[in-house]
Amino acid sequence: MEKQFWTVTEVMEIFEVDEAFLSDLEEEEVLCPVRRKKSPSKVFRVEELERLKLVKALVEDMGVNLPGVEVILRMRQMMFDMRKQFDEILDDLAQEFQGRLKAGK
């Protein structure tokens, strides 16, 4: 079973970032850690770790600042959403086409 939640300390060690960087990302709403019911400390879901990996690459490898990261992430999400819509349209067209082929026989 894969681990679902990661502590701030674990994330800092894995990604070699400091707490200030994580706080900045949280403040800019780039990352959204959660608080579990019985613990006052913040934890990160796997999805947030994947996002952090991308953010770290953008900041460190490509020199993108946090506002730029926000724009890139927003555009990336829009592209994923558009791709999903496009796939749904293609599925509808395929079903329509199949229905017409069957009706024509």
Image: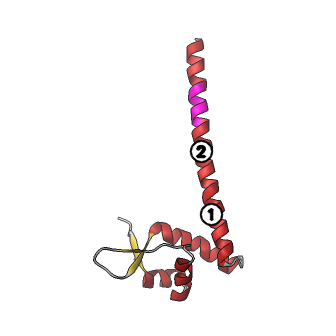
Tag 1 residue: 74
Tag 2 residue: 85
In the image, what residue occupies the spot 58% across and 26% down?
A: 96
In the image, what residue occupies the spot 59% across and 52% down?
A: 81
Residue type indicated by callout 1: Arg
Q: Position of residue 78 (x, y in %)?
A: 63, 56
The one nearer the camera, 22 or 60, is: 22
Asked if the magenta segment contains residue 93, the reply would be yes
Q: Position of residue 37 (x, y in %)?
A: 30, 74
Tell me which corner region of the image, top left, top right, bottom left or bottom right, holds residue 36.
bottom left
Residue type indicated by callout 2: Gln
> Bounds of the magenta span?
91-96
- When the figure is inspected, residue 72 is found, relative to residue 19, above or below; the finding is above
Q: Is residue 63 left or right of residue 39?
A: right
How much space separates mark 1 and mark 2, taking CA atoms? 17 Å
Tell me which corner region of the image, top left, top right, bottom left or bottom right, holds residue 55.
bottom right
How packed mark 1 is, by other alpha carbons closer than 10 Å (few <14, some 14-19, many 20 or more), is: few
How many marks overall? Answer: 2
Q: Residue furthest right?
A: 63
The one nearer the camera, 9 or 82, is: 82
In the image, what residue occupies the spot 59% across and 45% down?
A: 85
The disc label shown at residue 39, or none: none
Quarter of the image for the C terminus: give it: top right
